[in-house]
């Protein structure tokens, strides 16, 4: 294990990996909670969701929207958007069902896919204005490499922008309402303290925001360490303006703008990813891939970034949890497949190596295959992996 661990979630790895008896998630997922019967928090929440009075939740939503509703002369709600099915569902409903005037805000992925650009354009062409920001390419590539080596996730630089760019734009445009899609902690299993919350308070819930970002909501500590220890990082490449949107606005600026929270649409509407997909096919021109995404069986999730699959692959290396597990676990809870079917899918696809854009990924990060596999092996922990006949295998595979 490395002497300096910036990925603070690693400290949460349990000594023994156990699997939810209802779905296919394990207790290696950071912050997840299992009850005494071996059922994960997300499955417990499924039963709770089925008892929710969704008409009452919709009334809460309308009350919230009425508080912020403009007269058409300005945007009145920010929807962070990739152009995908989930943000498309949120934006389209807010505008065409509830009469809001959304501004879509997009932090560009590391490297767009063709279908990602097509869906991005299609959503905007269905009646939306969008502000898209593409960060300094040199800075983004250097940060992505640093995050891969020290956090086990090159995608982390995208997550920073996805989290903080909408807040910055909210301050700059004086739009006080921000609505994301689903709360991943609730939908996929995470912090049980978020069980029944409509929003994240940027001041009171600052610790959770930090936990979500691998234990640290700031890029600055990692970057400062990198300048001293990484030969490929040069301070001359990093103007503060280039890093502005990788950071949250200060609490002072947020208070000045009257922004203290952001909301989750999944609190107000029962969140079913497959139904979001069909909704966007009909309403925003959304298209799925012809073939399945690497590491899973679905064709409609995380389509916009060529390197998105490496985020899930490294999550599989660190925690034994790949892309397929998220898809299958949610579809069990939605009643679309059985646990037995899900286990078969997980055994077949979870942890599949994303070969399609591998060469481009190496070129983007400026690393060799030898360096890449060295990084991979540096993130294998004995709680999760063991050597068997000279090959790495999961210590506690799903049953």
Image (cartoon, rainbow, N blue to C red):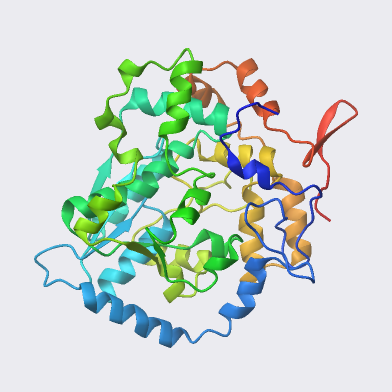
Work out whether residue 121 can be spotted. no
Of residues 184 and 132, the one drawn nearer to the viewer in this rendering = 184
> How many numbered discs, if any?
0
- Residue 350 position, x and y percent, is 69, 46
- Residue 102 position, x and y percent, is 24, 63
Viewport quadrant of the C terminus: bottom right
Viewport quadrant of the N terminus: top right
Left/right placement of residue 55 relative to residue 51 reads left
Q: Residue at x 41, y 54 (%)?
A: 84
Residue extending furthest toward the left? 73
Q: Residue at x 17, y 62 (%)?
A: 75
Of residues 72 and 346, the one drawn nearer to the viewer in this rendering = 72
Residue 151's place in the image compared with 57, above or below, is above
- Residue 53 position, x and y percent, is 49, 87
Residue 86: quarter of image: bottom left
Left/right placement of residue 142 relative to residue 64 reads right
Residue 135's place in the image compared with 118, above or below, is above
Residue extending furthest toward the top? 231
Residue extending furthest toward the right? 389
Q: Residue at x 49, y 26 (%)?
A: 146
- Residue 65 position, x and y percent, is 27, 75
Work out whether residue 376 can be spotted. yes
Residue 240: quarter of image: top left
């Amino acid at each position: 294990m490395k002497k300096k661990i910036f990925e603070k979630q690693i400290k949460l790895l349990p000594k023994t990996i156990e699997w939810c008896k209802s779905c296919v998630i394990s207790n290696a997922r950071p912050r997840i909670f299992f009850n005494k019967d071996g059922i994960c928090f997300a499955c417990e929440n499924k039963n709770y969701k089925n008892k929710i009075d969704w008409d009452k939740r919709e009334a809460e939503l309308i009350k919230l929207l009425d508080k912020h509703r403009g007269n058409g002369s300005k945007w009145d709600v920010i929807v962070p958007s990739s152009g995908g099915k989930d943000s498309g569902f949120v934006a389209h409903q807010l505008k065409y069902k509830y009469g809001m005037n959304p501004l879509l805000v997009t932090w560009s992925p590391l490297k767009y896919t063709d279908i990602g650009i097509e869906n991005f354009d299609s959503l905007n062409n269905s009646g939306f204005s969008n502000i898209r920001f593409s960060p300094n390419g040199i800075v983004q590539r250097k940060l992505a490499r640093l995050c891969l080596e020290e956090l086990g996730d090159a995608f982390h630089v995208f997550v920073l922008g996805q989290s903080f760019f909408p807040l910055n734009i909210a301050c700059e445009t004086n739009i006080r309402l921000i609505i994301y899609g689903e709360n991943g902690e609730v939908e996929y299993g995470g912090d049980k303290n978020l069980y029944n919350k409509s929003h994240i308070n940027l001041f009171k819930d600052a610790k959770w925001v930090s936990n979500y970002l691998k234990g640290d909501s700031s890029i600055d500590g990692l970057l400062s360490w990198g300048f001293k220890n990484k030969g490929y990082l040069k301070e001359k490449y990093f103007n503060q303006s280039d890093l502005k949107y990788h950071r949250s606005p200060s609490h002072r600026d947020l208070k000045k703008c009257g922004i203290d929270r952001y909301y989750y649409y999944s609190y107000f509407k029962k969140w079913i990813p497959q139904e979001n997909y069909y909704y966007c096919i009909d309403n925003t021109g959304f298209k799925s891939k012809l073939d399945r995404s690497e590491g899973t069986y679905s064709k409609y999730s995380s389509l916009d970034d060529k390197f998105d699959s490496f985020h899930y692959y490294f999550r599989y290396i660190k925690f034994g949890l790949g892309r397929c597990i998220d898809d299958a676990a949610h579809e069990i809870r939605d009643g679309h497949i059985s646990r037995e079917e899900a286990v078969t899918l997980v055994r077949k696809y979870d942890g599949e190596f994303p070969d399609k854009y591998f060469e481009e990924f190496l070129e983007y990060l400026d690393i060799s295959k030898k360096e890449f596999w060295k990084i991979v092996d540096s993130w294998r922990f004995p709680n999760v992996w063991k050597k068997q006949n000279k090959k790495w295998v999961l210590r506690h595979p799903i049953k």
